[in-house]
Image (spheres, rainbow, N blue to C red):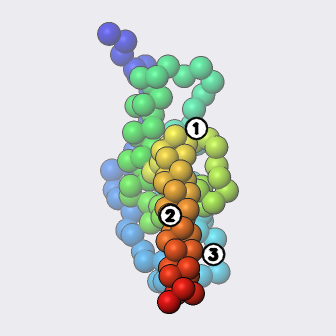
Amino acid sequence: MLQPPRSSLQVAAVPAQRVPARDRDQDAPWHTEAVCRRDEAGLFFAPSKEPTAARLSREEAAKRVCARCPVMVECREHALLQPEPYGVWGGLTAAERRVVLARRRRRDLELKKAARATNRIAAAG
């Protein structure tokens, strides 16, 4: 069985304090408080031709960094709104973000259909 290559990925042991968005400095951009700014960027983006086992290990390490980030939600929404095609953002891989976006599109379509049906019923009533 293939073993993921040993790497020097280190995740800080001290978790960051989560600060509610309303308590943060509203003038500073969200990314100034991102924990990943202090970690190596290679953790969040795949090198070319990365073996699957190594990719999965790297992504899990990146997600652990995201899990202790005080701006994880803002980061995730940024990546979903852009949309960011690569890397781990807000604790989600690119594939996971595509799933979230597809679910949002389906939900929005269902809400629009329900609203049209409600409007037709109200107009007929």
The circle on residue 28 is 3
Q: Position of residue 96 (x, y in %)?
A: 48, 45
83 is higher (above) or lower (below) than 40: below
Where, by quadrant of the figure, is residue 27 drawn?
bottom right
Foreground label between 3 and 2:
2
The quadrant of the rendering that contains the N terminus is top left
Q: Secondary structure at mark 2?
A: helix
Neighbor class of circle 1 (other Cα within 10 Å; few <14, some 14-19, many 20+) is some
Q: Position of residue 37 (x, y in %)?
A: 57, 54
Q: Quadrant of residue 59?
A: top left
Please state the horizontal and vertical placement of residue 45, each as a whole percent of the image.
58, 38
- Relative to 19, is 76 on the left or the right? right
For disc 2, the neighbor class at 10 Å (few under 14, some 14 to 19, many from 20) is: few
The type of residue carrying mark 3 is Ala
- Which residue does the numbered mark 1 point to in the structure image? 45
Disc with the residue nearer the chain's start (1 vs 2): 1
Instruction: Find disc 2 in the rendering and name its residue.
Output: 110
Residue 115 visible in the snapshot:
no
Pair 1/2: label in front: 2
Helix, strand or loop under label 3:
loop
Q: Position of residue 57 (x, y in %)?
A: 40, 31
Q: In the orientation shown, which residue stands out farthest toward the bottom?
A: 125
Residue farthest to the right? 82
**Element under disc 1:** loop
Residue type indicated by callout 1: Phe
Asked whether residue 60 is in view, the answer is yes
